[in-house]
Image (spheres, rainbow, N blue to C red):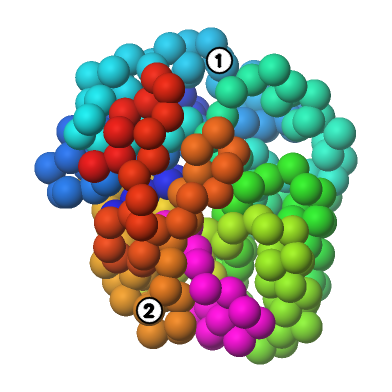
């Protein structure tokens, strides 16, 4: 198993006690082969996370945990970037000269408005007026070529359900299909984000029908991520999401080393171990 979406105390919204060491110990206890730390990187000056990530300290902490778990658990260095078209010129220059295994691109804003705060994004909108601009922004994120992974597609439903009721992808099938085609064309990986199982609707991001459409278009692989912001979140929803992925036709999971895609059997050990300079051996 791999969990490639974990937030530590390097993210402003992580809960107390969310140290890299604590996650690594829990992952080893549960039998994981590898985990990826993906703390938030924000480019909007109005966001609370703007300027929070200290790359040098982040790198030192990851190197320390890699050394402690060498030969027992693979530790991958990732980051989650909020894609905003208004700041789409910023990530490339920030990443220049920096070392990451993978970069998750995710949409948390539409038109600089955060849809995760106080429900204001939904005020005065119909479901289509809320979702269509969101999916347009997601497509732009994929097509930007900035990211290795598309994070939590259909994440807007986490906040829209209380306003509009249960989410269905059907009204947005055209946009979702275009996003999935862009994922396959670009080589970007689709994340199966299991954090939805911590919410009342009890399903991952994206939902099963979207996974099935991805398979119909030729997709066979996903990344798995619990989107943990606390130790108690780790592993939550991974077994259920893996079962859903299998039912949709997924057969592989993806992880990354130095921005290079690696393939493992979904729910099984990697096809071949990754052995990289200065990195723990897989397994």
Distance (Cα) linking label 2 and label 1: 38 Å
Task: Locate the N terminus by quadrant.
Answer: bottom left
Q: Nearer the viewer, residue 258 or 12?
A: 258
Q: Nearer the viewer, residue 273 or 153?
A: 273
The image quadrant of residue 129 is bottom right
Q: Residue at x 78, y 48 (%)?
A: 145
Q: Is residue 173 above or below residue 267?
A: below
Coordinates of residue 194 in the picture (x, y in percent)? 40, 61
Q: Is residue 207 above or below residue 170?
A: above
Label 1, on which residue? 54
Q: Residues within 10 Å of mark 2 (few under 14, many from 20)?
A: some
Coordinates of residue 257 in the picture (x, y in percent)? 50, 38
Q: Secondary structure at mark 1?
A: loop
Label 2, on which residue? 246
Q: Residue at x 36, y 64 (%)?
A: 265
**Magenta stretch holds residue 212:** yes
Q: Residue at x 69, y 72 (%)?
A: 180
The image quadrant of residue 131 is bottom right
């Amino acid at each position: 198993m791999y969990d490639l979406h974990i937030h530590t105390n390097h993210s402003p919204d992580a809960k107390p006690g969310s140290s890299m060491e604590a996650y690594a110990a829990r992952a080893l206890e549960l039998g994981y082969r590898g985990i990826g730390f993906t703390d938030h990187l924000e480019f909007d000056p109005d966001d609370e996370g703007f300027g929070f990530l200290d790359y040098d300290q982040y790198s030192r902490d990851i190197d320390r945990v890699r050394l402690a778990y060498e030969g027992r658990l693979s530790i991958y260095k990732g980051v989650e970037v909020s894609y905003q078209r208004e700041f789409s010129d910023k990530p490339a220059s920030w990443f220049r000269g920096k070392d990451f295994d993978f970069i998750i691109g995710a949409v948390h804003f539409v038109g600089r408005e955060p849809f995760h705060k106080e429900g204001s994004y939904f005020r005065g909108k119909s479901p289509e007026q809320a979702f269509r601009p969101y999916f347009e922004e997601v497509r732009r994120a994929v097509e930007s070529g900035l990211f290795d992974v598309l994070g939590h597609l259909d994440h807007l439903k986490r906040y829209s359900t209380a306003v509009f009721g249960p989410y269905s992808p059907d009204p947005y099938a055209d946009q979702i299909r275009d996003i999935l085609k862009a994922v396959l064309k670009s080589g970007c990986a689709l994340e199966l984000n299991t954090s939805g199982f911590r919410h009342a609707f009890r399903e991952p991001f994206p939902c099963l029908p979207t996974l099935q459409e991805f398979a119909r278009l030729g997709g066979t692989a996903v990344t798995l991520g619990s989107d943990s912001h606390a130790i108690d979140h780790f592993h939550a929803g991974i077994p259920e999401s893996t079962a859903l992925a299998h039912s949709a036709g997924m057969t592989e999971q993806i992880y990354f080393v130095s921005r290079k895609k690696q393939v493992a059997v979904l729910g099984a050990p990697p096809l071949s171990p990754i052995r990289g300079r200065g990195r723990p051996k897989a397994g």
